[in-house]
Image (cartoon, rainbow, N blue to C red):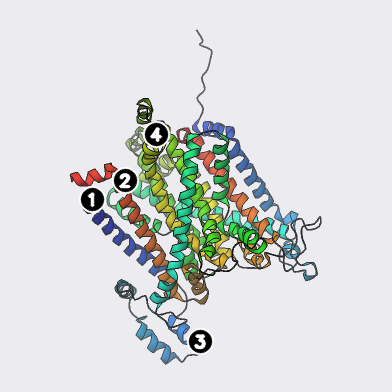
Amino acid sequence: MIKYILQRLAMMIVVVLGISFIVYTIMNLTPGNPAQLILGQSAPPEQVAKLEEELGLNDPFFVRYFNYITDMVRGDFGESYQTGLPVFEEILSRFPTTLTLAAVAMFIAALVGVPIGVISAVRQYSFMDAASTVAALIFASIPNFVLGLILMLVFSLNLGWFPATFLNNPSSYVLPAVTLCTATMATLVRMTRSTMLEVLKQDYIRTARAKGAEEKSVVLHHSLRNALLPIITVIGVDFGYLLGGTVVIESVFAIPGLGSLLITSIRMKDTPVVMAAIMFVTLAYSLVNLIVDIVYAYIDPRIKSQYERA
Amino acid sequence: MNENIEYKARSQFVSVLYRLKKNRLAMLGLAVLLIMAAVALCAGFIADYDKDVIGQDTANRLQGPSAEHWFGTDQFGRDVFARIVYGARISLTMSIIAMLIAVAIGAIIGAIAGFYGGFRDNILMRIMDILLAIPPMLMSISIVAALGQSMVNLLIALSIAYIPVFARVIRSSILSIKDQEFIEAAKCCGSSDRHIIFKHIIPNAIGPIIVQATLAMGSTILIIASLSFMGLGVQPPESEWGTMLYEGRDYLRQAPYLVLFPGTAITLAVISLNLLGDGLRDALDPRLKN
């Protein structure tokens, strides 16, 4: 098991290095001179040249990338062009809000989506099954910012049940999290339903029923446990989409998270902040996928035994 | 006994079409898409771009839906229906072009990786894995952030974000085909690698590509609208659906229809593409149904 975890960790480091290279390359395509941007258009050329030298902008691309990575490992993402403050501190102060939002959304999606998927599979072709399939289709297709605006109109502006602006209290998270979770919830309903239908046809389920196991035990113990593997994969993959999706949701509900920082920084052409924010989200995504892989191995004895035998 | 009876084998295309026709939801999706495409094509006959779409008429601002303005007017007095009709043109055209670019480049990468295997496959697929590790929305945002906010840059961003998806699909289709007898036969006949890839392998691997492209088109419409909604995509006064939502959100309380109509248009387009994509997948491989 430890060998498996170490192997996955090594793979994650390679992927993260690759991501950092791609993001760094893309960000280097940004037109304009960062030194000029920091000092302003009216700055004298000598001063601009001096700052260019200080920032290492005259170094070859790979040298700059290497310096960026070594600084990044030490937690130094550079300074913001706009505020002059360390980017890492700004990101750290905003990241918990984004992570909480994505985690709450995923929790709601799993808590509602998986049971609905199970019921749909157990009662295939029932009204409940048809209703959940149609609802899943609509929720998977409705853009989350449209849903967010509708929910805000109904529950904040008209009914006044939830605050229309973000106040960093639990009730402020409800509408954004519900908005964010719908697409993942729809995917989970569909995935759980189809996997459960597959599992319920297996011989060992018939055997379990034949030996007199209770229906509840057959569904929850024998079927759901075996259907969990693809469901966990969806949770892992979709967590990345939720982290990406928070960018839009934060913009709808004016949440001071990483997403809104990213959008503001893009408008201000604050490249170090943009790069760090994107790196941070993709890093979190890779980390979640690593955790999912480990959980996968823990749940599936076949994966675990592969590594125990070796 | 029954010597006169001729058994005519259905071609794969005809049987797929037959199965697709039997799927009512997929046909509904196709019908909605065809209507949207027709409306987008005939936008010039439905509304006047200069007068209704970008022309301002402040005397008629924020008028609710009426016989004259079916979907009402926005904060500048522009006709919302006309803007949605022209918006269909932008959303559909951009997503189709982005998909074509992504499929073309993804096909080349996937074909090289799948057909030749070995070192080339390893290198190309590891690069694709890394690209796939960045969610398409974030990838698009970072490219738009670097290149600047414009329609062309958004198109480049979307294409790059979806290249790895198609490269993977095409590679796996090729892997399942390349060892079959008809490929060996083509090799024995002295066909070149390029001829085998483009004339024999890709036409046989086209099914999964079409399914993926249909489903990905829905996602690209969402990303285009999301980026425009955040002010990073299509810029006002262009009448893209996300841009309309971006402008309409400030009037959410007094004119909710400014959000509801473009929002419905996006949802309808995405639902139709998802229905058609699901239908095509089932039609191509009926075993996958459920």
Farthest left residue?
A310
What whole-number distance in Å separates the C-alpha atoms at marks 1 and 3? 57 Å
The answer to the question of whether label 1 and label 3 lie on touching residues, with beta carbons closer than 8 A, is: no
Mark 1 nearby-residue class (10 Å; few <14, some 14–19, many ≥20) = some
Looking at the image, residue B184 sits to the left or right of residue B6; the answer is left
Q: Are marks 2 and 3 on the same chain?
A: yes
Q: Nearer the viewer, residue A309 or A212?
A: A212
What whole-number distance in Å separates the C-alpha atoms at marks 4 and 3? 71 Å
> Could you tell me which chain the residue with mark 3 belongs to?
A
Residue drawn 45% across the image and 54% down it? A107
Q: Are marks 1 and 3 on the same chain?
A: yes
Q: Which mark sits nearer the N-terminus, 4 or 3?
A: 3
Q: Amino acid at mark 2?
A: Ile
What whole-number distance in Å separates the C-alpha atoms at marks 1 and 4? 29 Å
Q: Which residue is mark 1?
A: A1
Indicate the position of residue B173 as horizontal and vertical percent values: 40, 42
Q: Which residue is mark 3?
A: A41
Secondary structure of the residue carrying tag 3 is loop
Q: Which residue is mark 4?
A: A218
Q: Amino acid at mark 1?
A: Met
> Could you tell me which chain the residue with mark 1 belongs to?
A
Residue drawn 45% across the image and 43% down it? A191
Indicate the position of residue A126 as horizontal and vertical percent values: 55, 34
What whole-number distance in Å separates the C-alpha atoms at marks 2 and 3? 59 Å
Q: Nearer the viewer, residue A70 or A26?
A: A70
Q: Amino acid at mark 3?
A: Gln
Q: Which residue is mark 2?
A: A299
Residue drawn 46% across the image and 49% down it? A111
